[in-house]
Image: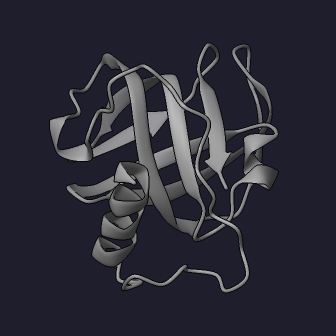
Amino acid sequence: MYDEQRRIAILREAGFGSKDPIPGRDYSEAPPTTTPRTRVDSLVAERPIGRIEMVVLRRYPQRMVSSENWNGYVAAACGRDETGIVGLVLWGDEVEQVKVGDIVRIESGWCRRKGSQMVVSSGRNGRLTVIG
């Protein structure tokens, strides 16, 4: 019950009212987790993230990156929870998995500051899950 109320609050704050952002898409309950949830307004740059959940508001086009740290596709996105908006970096398979309107959970990710904005990602060691 609590998860359903939180999902509705996130969608309402994102401007979708209490309706699902994409009609017909199943946003069923996510697998349970014991890690406490971090909210966007409490993110701290250069600190790991235990768990954060947000609705994806926009996804930008993917691009190919080839460096000594990463070879593959990367895409930027932005998402929000009930407390604010944050940038999101999608790596590899995440680029194809995440669509606008999805609610995503990042576990064991990272947070950085780019200019005046906070950016989160699953990075190398974390995990991004599309809830639903």
Which residue, as the protein is rendered here, is positioned at the far front? Answer: 1
Residue 64 position, x and y percent, is: 80, 44
Q: Residue at x 43, y 59 (%)?
A: 4
Judge by depth and name the residue closer to the eye, 64 or 22: 22
What residue lies at 28% left-to-right and 73% top-to-bottom? 13
Q: Is residue 52 left or right of residue 40?
A: right
Label total for image: 0
The quarter of the rendered structure image containing the N terminus is bottom left
**Residue 123 occupies which quadrant of the picture?**
top right
Q: Residue at x 69, y 15 (%)?
A: 69
Q: Quadrant of residue 47?
A: top left
| Quarter-of-image position of residue 50 | top left
In the rendered image, residue 96, in percent from the top left (x then y), is placed at 81, 53
Q: Nearer the viewer, residue 31 or 51?
A: 31
Please give the name of the residue rendered at 67% of the width and 56% of the height, measured from the top-left corner.
132
Q: Is residue 94 left or right of residue 18?
A: right
* Residue 65 drawn at (x, y percent): 75, 36
**In the rendered image, the vertical position of residue 48 relative to residue 5, given as above or below:** above
Q: In this rendered view, identify the residue nearer to me: 7 or 130.
A: 7
Picture layout, residue 101 above or below residue 124: below
Image location of residue 88, percent across then percent down: 49, 47
Q: How is the image coloured?
A: one colour
Q: Is residue 52 rendered to the left or right of residue 69?
A: left
